[in-house]
Amino acid sequence: MNENRKVKIRVRQLSKVFGNQPKKALEMRNQGLKRPEILEKTGQTLGLSNIDFDVYEGELLVIMGLSGSGKSTLIRCLNRLIEPTEGDIFIDEQNITTLGDKALLESRRRHFSMVFQNFALFPHRTVQQNAEFGLEIRGVDKAERRETAAHALKQVGLEGWENAYPNQLSGGMQQRVGLARALANDASVLLMDEAFSALDPLIRGDMQQELLELQSRMQKTTVFITHDLDEALTIGDRIVLLKDGEIVQIGTPEEILTRPADDYVRRFIEGVDRSRILTAENAMRKVRATVRDTDGPRTALHKMHENSIDSIYVTRRDRTLVGLLEVDAAKALAQAGKETITEALTQDFRSVGPEEPLQNLFAMFNEKSFPIAVVDEQQRLLGVVVKGAVLDELAQATEAGDN
């Protein structure tokens, strides 16, 4: 994550005690006691303790942990549906923990929309009317809210379903209505609390991809709560992992998989298919040699011989990939007295972007085992991946997770 990105939400020293003696519980926490001991001695539950993290503008941050870890408490503290016991929460540099009731209500309307695990749709209202609901209670003009809600429904793939009722929709479609309602409110932050947990696995996977596509288009700052590690690894730009109300690690999916902070995280990630998370960029190697599309066959043969390879990628001056030249084709061109190589280039190779999951690369190695080209959005050659590098990367990641 680029540390130079604008911070949308900044949380500092946030704690929450459930009970009527919060000060006593925090004093014991400061003396080094943990949640179970504090509960036993005081009857107070330390829901959150000294939580520090940032959420960047346009980031999809996942907060995850097992049941009782404090994740749902944390997301509700962000908009003060649950009042923090201590600490600060800044939204666009405004500390919402200091706001009075009226200012807090306005801040919630401007900054936060929520999507819950249960769809929370009104059964007697149409899809369109459900999507309009947040705008309606804000007093938005009828024509404007209809237009805004219709646009939000289109964003989530429900165009044409405006007049249907919730009981006519599948679970995934109902959750999309809830998502459209949140988007229609046009808040700057989307809070999603176990939003896909009630869906069956197939629909859940579809909704995860739907969210990723929506995020790529809208770049909405999103905080997503889940207890499911696979879900967190699939959708998160970064993950905040909680245990007993405390943060045990913050990092990208790759960092959590390859550099677990402690034994708890190592146990947490056991059994994860690392090939789903690690990407072509992780296994990418520097290209040993390339030739220009203006070079001749003898230059290509010289470079192949010099580097002990039997094929070579061909690029333009700006590194744009144009094809691959095999040694036999280069020899035939040289024997025929040709001065250029472009007529003998093959497209019988695979290229991927740097974010391509490693699990997708295994099937791409054909019988000739050409290195897989890694290219950027402009099709410029960044590097190559060979089969052995994929296996090495996975082995190293597994070793890091086991240590």
Image (tube, rainbow, N blue to C red):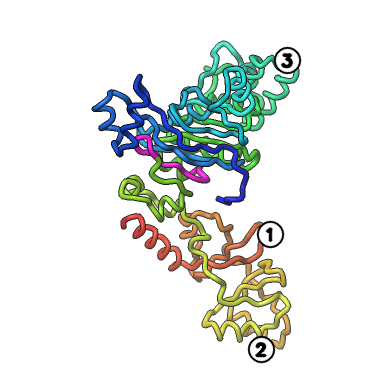
User: What mark, if any, has residue 378 been given in the picture?
Assistant: 1
Instruction: Report crowding for label 3: few under 14, some 14 to 19, many 20 or more residues within 10 A (C-alpha).
Output: few
Figure quadrant of the C terminus: bottom left
Residue at the extreme top: 124
Asked if residue 347 is among those painted magenta in the image, a careful observer would answer no
Residue 302 vertical position relative to residue 139 in the rendered view, above or below? below
| First in sequence: mark 2 vs mark 1 | 2
Q: Is 6 displayed left or right of 258 in the figure?
A: right
**Disc 2 residue crowd, few under 14, some 14–19, many 20+, Cα 10 Å:** few
Spatial CA distance of label 3 from label 1 is 45 Å
Please state the horizontal and vertical placement of residue 112, each as a whole percent of the image: 58, 28
Mark 2 vs mark 1, foreground winner is 1
- Classify residue 323 by image quadrant: bottom right
Disc 2 versus disc 3: distance between alpha carbons?
A: 77 Å
Q: Position of residue 108 (x, y in %)?
A: 59, 24
Q: What amino acid is labelled 3 in the image? A: Lys
Three-letter amino acid code at the position of disc 1: Gln
Of residues 287 and 166, the one drawn nearer to the viewer in this rendering = 287
Residue 142's disc number: 3
